[in-house]
Image (cartoon, rainbow, N blue to C red):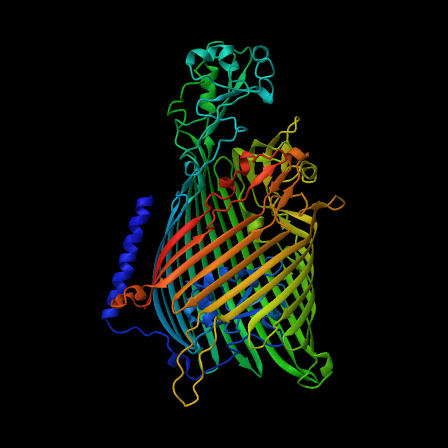
Amino acid sequence: MRRSCTASLLLASWVVLRASHAAAQGAPSELPHAGDDAAPDIVVVGRRGSAVTDIAPLAVLDASAIAALGAQSVEEVNRAIQGQTRSADGSAPILLLNAQRVSGYQEIQSLPPEAIEKIEILPEPAALRYGFPPSRRVVNYVTRRRFTQMEARAAVGSTLPTGRGTINARTGYTRLRDDARLTANLDYTRSDPLYWSDRALRPDPDVPFDALGNVTGLGGGAIDPALSARAGGAVIIAPVPADPGARRTLAGYAAAANRPRLFDYGRTLTLAPANDTIKGEAVLGARVGATLGGSLSLSLEHSRDRSLAGPASASLIVPPTGRYTPFDGPVVLNRFLTEAAPLRVLDGRTTLAVGATLRGALAGWQWDATVSLNQTVQRGVTDRAIDLSGARAALVGGADPFAPLSSALLADRLVDRTWQRTRTLAAKLVASDDPLRLPAGRATVTATLEGTRLSAASALRGVDTFDLRLGRAQAEAGLALDLPLTSRVNNVLAAVGDVSANASVNVRQVEGFGTLSDSTFGFAWTPFRGLQLTGSLRRSRAAPDPAQLSAPPRTIENVPLFNLASGRTEVVTLSRSGNPALLADRRAVRSLSLTWKPWQSSELRVGASYEATQLRDQTGLLATLTPRAEALVPGLFVRDADGRLRSVTYRPVNFDLERQRKLQLTLTSTGRIGSPPPSSGDGATVPGDERPSYYLGVVPTYAFEDRLRLREGSFFLDLLNGDTIGSYTPRVSGYAYAGVNKRGYGGTLGLYYGGERLIRGDDRVNDLRFRPIVQVALSAYVPVASLLPSQDWARHLQLRLESANLLDSRQEVRNGGGTTPSRYQTDLIDPLGRTVTVSLRKRF
C-alpha cells in the first residue's frame, strides 16, 4: 500500500511537470496582473466588495496578508484564521462572497487563494444585515475583478513515526471577469490504514481475550474452589496453559493465576481506516439579463473507509467433562478466533450539494434568492461477530474447546448492513433597504422568507432489521432593523459618539414541533474612531437535526470501554442509534464585545468577546458518565449486581439545562516588515513594495462556567471541574497563527494550547488528569523558479514542506496513582501524531 502511494506521487509529480513544461512551450497563459485589476468596476446589482458598515471588523486581511498565510486553498485559509472566525461558543462563521450571500460553501471553497483580494472578519451583529441571526461571525471574501488561473497540485505525506501514508492530487480552473466567474476543481485523496502494530501500544490487561484463551468463572466469580485453594487466593482469571498436557491439571492454571495472557492485535486492528475520497465541484456566476446576477454551483464527493475491528471474540462455556479441563464445574473460555479473518467495517458516504442564487434590485430594495439541495447517503457493512451456535453444540458434544475451530464452524458471520439518507431542500429570499431617514442616519430594514423540506430515511438489515422514514416541512419569516441613534457625522449627540440599536424576530412553523421563534436585541457604540463596543441578547428555538432522529441502530459485542467507577476497562455491548423523540432546544445568549484598532495606519486590532449562554433541551450524546450521573439516564448505562458495566447505548438525548460563560480575546496584525520604499518626487516610476508581508493572530479563550443538568430537579455536572459526558473541555485554551511571505518565499507557524483538565472517578485513585498540551504546526515553501531560473517550466511552481504536530505532542493522561490507563494511552487518543507532507503546486 505504501509503495503504491509513493508510485502514485511520482506519477502525479511527473504529470504536473510535463503539463507545466507543455504550457510553457505553448501560448502564454493569462495570469493576473495589475492591468486586470485596474479595469473599471461594473456593478450590476447588490453591494459587491466590502461588508464593513457601522459594525467595525475584527480583522481585515489584504492580498499580501493572505499570501503570508501560505495557504494553497481557501479551505487552508479558513483553517489558518479559524481562531478569529469562530464565535466564543465554537460556532462556524457565515460566509459571504463580495458582501453577498451564496447558496453554499462550495461557491467560496472552489476559489484559489490568489483570487481573493481581501478578507473581512466581522462580529456577530453584522449577520443581521444578511438575513441571519446574530449568533455567528461573518467572513466576507472579496475577489479580484479580473483573474484567470489553472492549477495542478500533487502531495505525499506520512505520519512520523511511519505508519500511514497519504497522497493527494488536485487540479482546478478559475476565471473571474467582473461579475462573471467560473471555477471547476477535481480532488482525489488516498490514505493508508494505520495498524495497531504501527504504534507502541501495550495490550489492555482488562481485556480477557487471547489467541489461546483465558479461563474465567461463570458470572465473573472465582473459577473453581480447588484452583483458588491451590493458588492461595480467589482465582478470577487464568490463562490456558500452552502445554496441552498441563491443561488437564490445576497446577497448569495455578502457575499464572490472575495473570491473564495478553493479546497483541498486530495488523488485525486499524487505528485509522484506509480511505479514498474523490471530490468534484463547479461554480458558474454571471449576469442574468440587464438587471440581475446569479450563480449555479455543484459539488459531489464520495468517500470510502475500510477498517479492521480485530479478530472475532468468543466466550464459550466449557462443560466439566474432565477430559479437557480439571475443573469440577463449567467455566468460560475467552479467546480470539485468530483462525478466521479479522472482522471488517466498510463505510461509504456520498454527499451532493447543488445551489443557485439570483439577485437584483427593486424599488430601492436589494434582494437575493437562494435555492439549495443538500443530500448525504451513507452505507455501512459491519461484521459484528461469528455465529458460534455450531461451536457451542460441538462443545456440548465433547469437542476439544482449545482446538482451532474448523472453517465450517466459522463460515457464518453476523453482518449488519446499514443505510441512511438525509436530504434538505431549502429556498430563501432576503431583501434589504434603507427606507427611513432618521436624524442620525438611515435605518436599515432586512426581511427574510424561507421554506425548507427535510427528509431522513434509514434501514438496517442483518441480525436485526430496522426501517424509519421521517419528513419535516418548515416555513419561516423574519424582520431585522438597524437604527442609528447618535452620530458624529450628522451632529446628533456627537459627544456620545456613534450609537445604533438593532433588533430582529424570526418565526417559523416546523412540522412536528409547532411554532418556533428567534428574537434578538443589540447595540453598537463607537465612542471614538477605532474603538467599538457591541452587545446583544438572543433567544432562539430550533428543531433537532434529522440525522440525530433517524440514525439506524447498530450493536457491537465485546467492545472495551473505560469505566470511571472502577478505573479499569470493561468489555461491554455497545449500541448506537438515533432518537425520533428528541425535542426542540431553547437558547438564551448574552454577549458583549469590544474591538479596538489603536492606529488607523496599522492593521493591528485587539478584541474581547464575553458570552453567557443558557441552553434548555439541547441535544447531546452521553459517551461517558460518572456512576452518580448514570442513574439519571437509566437504560443507557447498564451494570450488573457487582457494579460492572455490561452495556452502553450511544443515543442522542435532550439535556435539561446547561449554563456556559466564556471570554475570548483576539489580537490580529497584518502588514509589511521594514520601512516603505521612498516615494518619487520627480515623476519617475516607484519600484514595487517588495518588503516581506506578514500575518499574526492570537486567540486565547477562558471558560468561566460550564454546568450541565441532565434532568430537571437533579444536580448539576461541573464540566470544568471533574465531571464529563465524554468530552474534555479545558478551562484555558488558545490558538495562534503566524505567517510571512516575500516574493514567493515564506513559512507559517501554528500553535494550539489546551490547559490541564480533571475528570473525577469514585475516589482519588480513579481520577483522571489530562496534562496541558501544546501542538505546533510548521510549513515552509519556495518558488522552484528561484532554484532553476533557466527552466521555463519552473515558473509559478511552488515546493512546500509542512508538518502538523511537529513536536509529536500527544494528550497525556494519568490516574490518581500516577499511571496511564490502557484506554488512555497517547497512541490511542491520537494515533496519527506528527505528519509531514511534501507538495508541488503549479499555477498556469
Outermost residue toward the left in this view: 25
Above or below for 754 versus 812: below
Q: Residue at x 62, y 41 (%)?
A: 769
Q: Is residue 668 left or right of residue 539?
A: left
Q: Position of residue 88 (x, y in %)?
A: 62, 59
Q: Residue at x 48, y 69 (%)?
A: 65
Tell me the quadrant of the picture where the N terminus can be found. Answer: top left
Residue nearest the observer in this picture, 363 or 565: 565
Residue nearest the observer in this picture, 50 or 638: 50
Q: Position of residue 636 (x, y in %)?
A: 63, 38
Query: Could one spot residue 408 in this view of the protein?
Result: yes
Q: Is residue 358 left or right of residue 439?
A: left
Residue nearest the observer in this picture, 665 or 237: 665
Outermost residue toward the bottom in this view: 682
Q: Position of residue 223 (x, y in %)?
A: 57, 16
Q: Position of residue 388 (x, y in %)?
A: 46, 25
Q: Quarter of the image holding residue 577?
A: top right
Query: Could one spot residue 119 in this view of the protein?
Result: no
Tell me the quadrant of the picture where the C terminus can be found. Answer: bottom left
Residue nearest the observer in this picture, 289 or 835: 835
Above or below for 26 versus 626: below
Q: Is residue 289 left or right of residue 429?
A: left
Q: Quarter of the image holding residue 111?
A: bottom left
Outermost residue toward the right in this view: 713
Above or below for 838 versus 693: above
